[in-house]
Amino acid sequence: MTPAEALRSALPDAVEEATDAFVRVKAEKVVEAARVLREKCGAEMLHQISGVDRPPDKMEVVYHFARLKPAAFLCLKVSVPRSNPVVPTLANEWASANWGERETWDLLGIRFSGHPHPYRILLPEDWEGHPLRKDYAYPVEYHGVDCVE
Amino acid sequence: MTEATRPGRPSYMPPPERFDPEVEQTILLTKAEWLVDWSRKSALWPLGFGLACCAIEMISTAMTKFDISRFGAEVFRATPRQADVMIVAGTVTHKMAPRVQRLWDQMADPKWVIAMGACTVGGGPYFKYGYHVVKGVDKVVPVDIYLPGCPPRPEALLEAIMRLQELVEARSKRLNGKDPGYTPPEKGSRQAKKDGLSPVEPWETAKAHKFDDAKKKTEEDEAKAKAAAAAAKKAAAPAAGAEGASGAPAAPKPERPARPPKPPETPEGGA
Amino acid sequence: MTTIQGVRLDEGERAAPTLPRDILTEELVFNMGPQHPSTHGVLRVVLRTDGEVVREAQPLIGNLHRCCEKILESLTYVQGLPYVDRMDYLGALNMEMGLVLSVEKAAAVEVPKRAQYLRVILCEINRVISHLFAAGQFGLDMGAFTPFLYMFREREEGLTLLNEVTGGRLLYHYIRYGGVTRDVSDDWKRKCIAWCDQVAAHMDEYNNLLTYNHIFLNRTVGVAIIDRETALRYGATGPILRAAGVPRDLRKDMPYSCYEDFDFKVPVGPHDKGVVGDSWNRHRQRLLEIEESLKIIRQAITKLPAGDVSNPKVTRGWKAPEGEAYVASEAPRGEISCYFVSDGGKAPYRARMRGPSFYNISLLSETSRGLLIGDLIALMGSIDITLGECDR
């Protein structure tokens, strides 16, 4: 079944928007939606987690799941408010979400509640700011090394 | 950052209290020093410090086609304590910078640094929007040789090692005060050509190139004729009437700025 | 298939390390990398070991985070292309494909057939030289220096071929939106086929020297098994997944850039020695993939159609219209994809690159429990990571 049909039948009140390319679900239901994709649509691997900053008031987390046979990518989108971006974590069920969510927190500042190790992964621990936000201010100095060219 | 690592202090200059002047005057060290310098330059052991893409070219240099072994430098030591030269090959990020500095501190004197690749020279392609990239490894360690390229070809790395060898060879001469610094070679000499210095200064090229005055006059006449034709066309356009103001009045051509005056002759001394 | 004298091994069995009872031991926590000859770049692994046995290994990445995604959002489309080269610098053309395919799908840009074939040829050459490097480096980690030198001999010739077409030895900037930059000559085609023959002729040498070497077999057979479930759970793709028995290759499953025109097999583990998913199988997987890639190159060169090599509508200041796309392709180390979002501006709104090594490294912590430190090196060498695409 297509992801839209499966999610509509299993979680009818969680689906906000459904096109051929993606299904947008409510943030609180993302874990259940991923489970539905795994059971009903054959998604075996979480391929990628992307965060997208949509100022002024929204942020998105886009999950791409990979189905092996027949090969396809299933896309889930979650919209969160920019002032308080919190999404329940998939890391307890999908091991590849562990690092993907850490990276989204690191670069965009989206929190994943219940993550076993919610720390920065790419940038140093004491880095300030979330660089991929559209209003990021480039640092001037970091630990005595100046950052301007 | 310690005093020793502040940029601008080349690593081959000794700290002031290294050599006792009495010792220097009493023992004739010249030939032995030359031997030591020759052996140092012929067996520069690099620290295997490949960070990114330039590391792959560094590995290619160590392979059979480009063969860094001819220069005695095929022994890439994994530990800084046994290495002479740190070839920083690849982008240095802010997360990695303290480790680069620590490795440089752990190296034993005399030590040199080759900054390989555009990222280490000045930030490379990441110089503008790379927030996590250190814009040049000389903000972290003092650099002796800068090697641009993205990535530099293995031949370029070999050239950098050859230049480093010249630096190493002249080390004891410098330490004993024999060579006070870089004195530029005479203009047009063989050494100047080897260093890549042009025999003609840029502001002298105008004199060197002979302008043909007769040709210049005909060009001026042609330009005047063109301007006259354009003016005639403009005069004819309102008479045609249908197009309207199709062409804005031609803006006057800006004048070419005057050639800058020749700077005064200053003696070029070593820094 | 070569005939090597039979090597007898107790496959799948490894002696568990034991200690006499009256020795008191302590666990040691220490650092491996970021400067280390075997970490394939600036990977830092914090190890907690009980003697020589690893109890926990935590990989810490980010030492090569070069802000690729932010830069792609800041510079124009054409200006941003060189930055994806530098993600996996060993397979740079495949990285370019990763970005370019997504953008082309979102913007519905047509790519002429000759350009697609050229992309295939050069990406496969790049795959061959990347696998040669990876296999050689794995041998280097295991202590065998000579195969690395020999594989570099073929690699240098391949780099010369790529240099002639693209202008770069390691980083190419060749694949652009709508096609490629330069065409190839007949002379180059002849040289390329000669190189393919040369590599194929030397495969026996590599197998003799390294793959079926008694010491190498002892060190890698049955070591650090990544099975199907672990690989799928952690999102590991590419040779790791195929050596674990999953027949997934995006060139066959979701063909892009005319890969469906070519006839090639997808080697899948288990191979003739060892257990499915162990380090030896991953190494053998790469060498078999080299042979398949050579087949593809030969077919593509013979069938190369005439035509343009680029789409004239895509100019230097080209902007993609509004839209988004997600296309994945098969890079030497796994699946690379780009989640591309455009809002019509001069730069991508979001170009989220998925580097395969990011997910390949993440399974290090689970797979390394109970391994000896030497086996951990075998694991890292056989996973074949490149930190550029992990940290971007």
Image: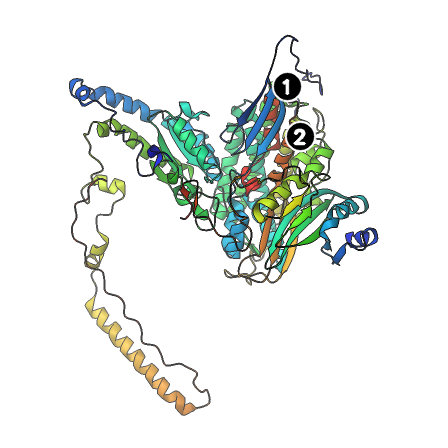
Q: Position of residue C314 (x, y in %)?
A: 55, 61
Q: Position of residue A124 (x, y in %)?
A: 52, 39
Q: Position of residue B251 (x, y in %)?
A: 34, 77
The answer to whether residue C205 shows anywhere in this view is: no
Q: What residue would you read off at disc 1?
A: C218
For marks 1 and 2, give the CA distance: 23 Å
Q: Position of residue C110 (x, y in %)?
A: 62, 59
Residue at 57%, 60% in the rendered image: C311
User: Does residue A77 appear to the left or right of B66 in the view shown?
Assistant: right
C281 relative to A18, above or below: above
Q: Nearer the viewer, mark 1 or mark 2?
A: 2
Residue at 60%, 39% in the rendered image: C358
C108 relative to A120, above or below: below
Which image quarter holds the C terminus of chain C?
top right
Q: Amino acid at mark 1?
A: Asn
Label 1 marks a residue whose chain is C
Q: Secondary structure at mark 1?
A: helix
The answer to whether residue B255 shows anywhere in this view is: yes
Label 2 marks a residue whose chain is C
Q: Secondary structure at mark 2?
A: helix
Residue at 36%, 85% in the rendered image: B233
User: Which numbered disc, 1 or 2, marks the residue that appears first in the sequence?
Assistant: 1
C300 relative to C314, above or below: above
Q: Amino acid at mark 2?
A: Glu
Q: Residues within 10 Å of mark 1 (few under 14, many from 20)?
A: some
Q: What residue would you read off at disc 2?
A: C366
